[in-house]
Amino acid sequence: MSSASRLDSFSEFDAPETRTQSNDQHPRLASSPVLMQSQAVVKSYRKGKIEIPVLHGIDFEVREQEMVSIVGASGSGKSTLLHLLGTLDSPDEGEIYFEGNRIDNLPAASREILRNQYFGMIFQFYHLLPELTTLENVLMPVMIQYPFMKYLGKRRALKKRAKELLEMMGLSHRLRHKPKELSGGEMQRVAIARALISEPRLLLADEPTGNLDRDAGMEILDILRTLNDQHNLTIVMVTHDLAIAEMTDRTVRLAEGLVTSV
């Protein structure tokens, strides 16, 4: 399904004024359109009667085909920002746009469509279903996306794509294995394949190497870098590892809920 046709299910909003952030290190991105941006996003959480402010007015954007890392100390708001971009949570104030359409105020059903068809998401913990095989875990998003009879009609093509993705991840020999039979690095590669099965426009990655040793973490980063360089996939990645952040096109630094540098 094309991007334009998939967007028909959302209300159209005027695109926000673009606030340019530095892309001096990568001139090829300077003319790329903005794919996603947040404007003056504020977010707090409550613990009992105590309100804990996390984000204090975040302006952020990512351009098509860009790979951006978000870094900062624990508690700086990195994961909170990523979850807001992915519509897993809603800001208290401010607005978030994707392809020129405001998404932070969409109803739950529309946000689910965004996460299922437009966004791929991977996390520090892999969230694989333990009772399913590797191949079945990768197919899960499209099994949810399509009605049962439509899925049956597409099953052969979808299985072919899932197998191709797992081959890209170096896991063609693990199709029938269950998560308990895989290493941490292998489980993360399954999670990446699962995130790609719906051909997303944007991949959001929350500490994707944080639960892995150095070698396995670098393997995951190499895969993400290849997806960006060779398949033009736009990626926003939260990481605490500055060495990993240096391998992305641009680094956004958060401190105490504010963007301190880009």
Image: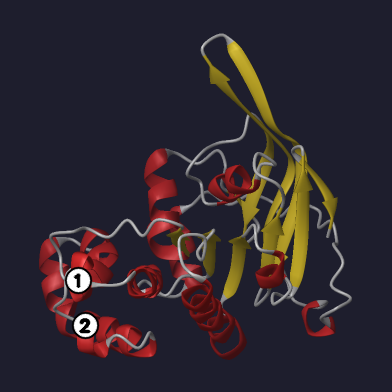
Helix, strand, or loop for circle 2? helix
Horizontal side of residue 223 vs 260, given as left or right: left
Q: Is residue 209 above or below residue 28?
A: above
Q: Are marks 1 and 2 in contact (CB under 8 Å)?
A: yes
Looking at the image, which residue is at 53% across and 73% down?
214
Q: Where is residue 27 shown, x and y percent of the image?
A: 85, 82
Residue at horizontal 65%, vertical 63%?
Answer: 241
* Quadrant location of the C terminus in the rendered image: bottom right
Asked whether residue 91 appears in the rendered view, the answer is: yes
Between disc 1 and disc 2, the foreground one is: 1
| Residue 177 percent location from the top left of the image | 16, 75
Q: Nearer the viewer, residue 175 or 108?
A: 175
Q: Quadrant of the N terminus?
A: bottom left
On the image, numbered disc 2 is attached to which residue?
Answer: 174
Q: Which residue is mark 1?
A: 181
| Residue with the most extreme top position | 49
Question: In whole angstroms, how far apart are the C-alphas of marks 1 and 2?
Answer: 9 Å
Which residue does the image show at 79% across and 85% down from the upper left? 28
User: What amino acid type should be assigned to the residue bearing mark 1?
Assistant: Glu
Q: Who's the residue at 39% across and 73% down the image?
A: 185
First of labels 1, 2 by sequence position: 2
The reply, left or right, for residue 50 in relation to residue 254 is: left
Q: Give the amino acid type for the residue marked by disc 2 in the picture.
A: Arg
Crowding near pointer 1: few (<14 within 10 Å), some, many (20+)? some
Q: Give residue 162's quadrant in the image.
A: bottom left
Q: Around disc 2, counting alpha carbons within 10 Å, would you say few (fewer than 14), some (14 to 19), or many (20 or more)?
A: some
In the rendered view, does 21 fall on the left or right side of 73?
A: right
Decide: is 245 above or below 104: below
